[in-house]
């Protein structure tokens, strides 16, 4: 197959591999990588890599790219789980003509990846909620993080919400339970976080405003408002001050105590934004396992809408 795409603004700053999956279907990451190496996928007529961030008006060309057989193989393996769909429909916070707001469960990926066979975008693309349209992802939420997540129902809304997130006009509040007693009751974290992209070291500035809601010798319940949106930002920043989040297997200051729930205790509690002078505020109630650990650690929190 020979095909070309011109990137529109809705996909600005998206990874190339995610863009291709969005356009071509849930094709394997390995197939994308192979075709890039063989020069069958080019960006602006040049060889590229799967992780590169694309921009508006970029031209992506595919040469002799065969993917139908692979897609059919995946379709046989991937059968949307009606139970998962029903569970998530039960956790709907708002469903209007332009977007869907969910209280996302921990353990479900937002979009497909190399290790994700089930993800919200694929699940809801086959749901009656998106009949006659399709879901657009407009922001990120880690697989193991629960809470407020927004899916756009049309391209125009996707462009608008993506811009609001990029311009930091969406105000996000997270709740976490972390190990130990956080010293300061409130303040800011300003860090330079390190990540690696295909072996290349990248340093990014990260800023978060925080407030301790309750604490004792064993644990702290903390509210965080990230100003920047770096990958794993809150998890890294809490790890950096020696108070990693309970259940975090990647960034951990302490070994998890035996008998404690293994879920990541990080929850996207509230999102606020404004569209055409109308304010939107969405809260996602804490999961039961989160409430159980709050009680177990003798912490206090009023979880109400």
Image: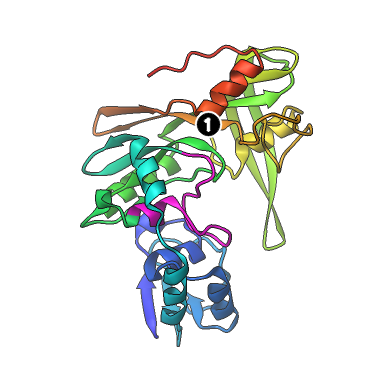
Was residue 114 drawn as part of the magenta stretch in this picture? yes
The answer to which of 195 and 288 lies nearer the viewer is: 288
The answer to which of 303 and 55 lies nearer the viewer is: 303
Q: Position of residue 285 (x, y in %)?
A: 44, 25
Q: Position of residue 2 (x, y in %)?
A: 39, 85
The answer to which of 97 and 42 lies nearer the viewer is: 97
Q: Secondary structure at mark 1?
A: strand
Report the residue at 65% width, 27% height from top. Answer: 189
Name the image colouring. Answer: rainbow
Q: Is residue 16 left or right of residue 265?
A: left
The answer to which of 3 and 276 lies nearer the viewer is: 3
Q: Quadrant of the C terminus?
A: top left
- Residue 249, above or below 270: below
Q: Position of residue 299 (x, y in %)?
A: 62, 13
- From where the camera sits, is residue 164 visible? no
Specify the quadrant of the image occupied by residue 103. Answer: top left
Report the residue at 67% width, 31% height from top. Answer: 245
Identify the main secondary structure in magenta. loop
Report the residue at 24% width, 44% height from top. Answer: 98
Residue neighbourhood size for the residue with mark 1, other residues' Cα within 10 Å, grouped as few (<14), some (14–19), many (≥20): many
Q: Position of residue 292 (x, y in %)?
A: 58, 22
Q: Quadrant of the N terminus?
A: bottom left
Q: Which region is colored magenta?
A: 105-124
The residue labelled by disc 1 is 267
- From where the camera sits, is residue 268 visible? yes
Was residue 39 drawn as part of the magenta stretch in this picture? no
């Amino acid at each position: 197959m020979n095909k070309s795409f011109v990137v529109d603004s809705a996909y600005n700053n998206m990874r190339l591999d995610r863009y291709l999956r969005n356009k071509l279907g849930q094709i394997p990451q390995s197939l994308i990588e192979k075709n890039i190496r063989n020069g069958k996928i080019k960006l602006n007529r040049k060889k590229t890599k799967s992780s590169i961030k694309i921009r508006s008006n970029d031209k992506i060309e595919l040469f002799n790219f065969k993917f139908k057989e692979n897609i059919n193989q995946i379709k046989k393996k991937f059968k949307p789980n009606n139970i998962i769909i029903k569970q998530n429909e039960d956790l709907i916070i708002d469903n209007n003509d332009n977007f869907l707001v969910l209280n996302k469960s921990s353990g479900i990926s937002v979009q497909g990846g190399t290790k994700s066979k089930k993800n919200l975008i694929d699940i809801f693309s086959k749901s009656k909620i998106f009949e006659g349209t399709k879901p657009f992802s407009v922001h990120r939420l880690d697989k193991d993080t629960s809470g407020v997540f927004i899916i756009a129902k049309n391209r125009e809304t996707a462009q608008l919400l993506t811009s609001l997130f990029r311009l930091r006009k969406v105000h996000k509040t997270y709740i976490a339970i972390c190990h130990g007693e956080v010293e300061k009751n409130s303040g800011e974290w300003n860090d330079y976080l390190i990540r690696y992209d295909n072996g290349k070291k990248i340093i990014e500035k990260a800023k978060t405003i925080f407030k301790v809601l309750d604490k004792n010798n064993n644990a702290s319940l903390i509210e965080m408002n990230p100003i920047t949106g770096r990958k794993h930002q809150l998890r890294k920043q809490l790890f950096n001050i020696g108070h990693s989040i309970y259940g975090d297997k990647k960034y951990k200051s302490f070994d998890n105590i035996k008998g404690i729930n293994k879920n990541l205790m990080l929850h996207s509690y509230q999102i606020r934004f404004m569209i055409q002078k109308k304010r939107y505020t969405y809260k996602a109630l804490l999961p039961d396992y989160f409430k159980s650990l709050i009680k177990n650690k003798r912490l206090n929190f009023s979880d109400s809408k």
